[in-house]
Image (tube, rainbow, N blue to C red):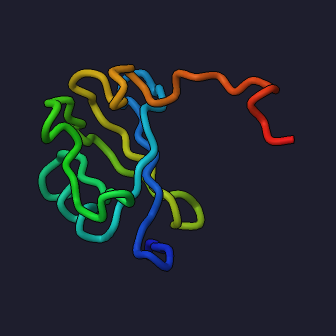
Amino acid sequence: MLKFDDRGLIPAIVQDAASGEVLMVAYMNQESLQRTLESGQAHFWSRSRGELWRKGATSGNTLTVREIWKDCDEDALLVKAEPAGPVCHTGERSCFFQRLEAADAPA
């Protein structure tokens, strides 16, 4: 059984189903996971806005979900999806486009 945190959320790592590239990390609640499973389109819970959202609803850059995997502790999800356009809100293909440098790390 999936383990949602005390806010009812579970982290979801989104990976390109074809290339394996990690595209983004977001959070799902039970409703967003259910909508994702029913529609085949990625839905998430916005912690900042406090609302459900479908990836690409305004931008058109949707995520068509091919598979969802749970980790061994059942407290994180891996969503393998086909992106339609860039995934990051900055316009980058992936949210992971900035390398962490030693100077960026906390002292």
Near-viewer residue (87 or 64): 87
Q: In what quadrant of the picture does the C terminus appear?
A: top right
Q: Residue at x 33, y 21 (%)?
A: 91
- Disc tally is 0
Q: Please identify the residue farthest to the right as the structure is shown.
A: 107
Q: Position of residue 15 (x, y in %)?
A: 42, 35
Q: Residue at x 37, y 57 (%)?
A: 48
**Image quarter of residue 9:** bottom left
Above or below, comparing residue 24 to residue 4 in the picture:
above
Above or below, comparing residue 76 to residue 105 in the picture:
below
Q: Position of residue 65 (x, y in %)?
A: 25, 42
Q: Residue at x 21, y 53 (%)?
A: 53
Above or below, comparing residue 70 to residue 101 in the picture:
below
Q: In what quadrant of the picture does the N terminus appear?
A: bottom left
Q: Position of residue 10 (x, y in %)?
A: 45, 64
Residue 42 in the figure: left or right of residue 101 = left
Near-viewer residue (57 or 65): 57
Residue 17 in the figure: left or right of residue 61 = right
**Image quarter of residue 79:** top left
Q: Residue at x 47, y 57 (%)?
A: 11
Q: Position of residue 69 (x, y in %)?
A: 42, 52
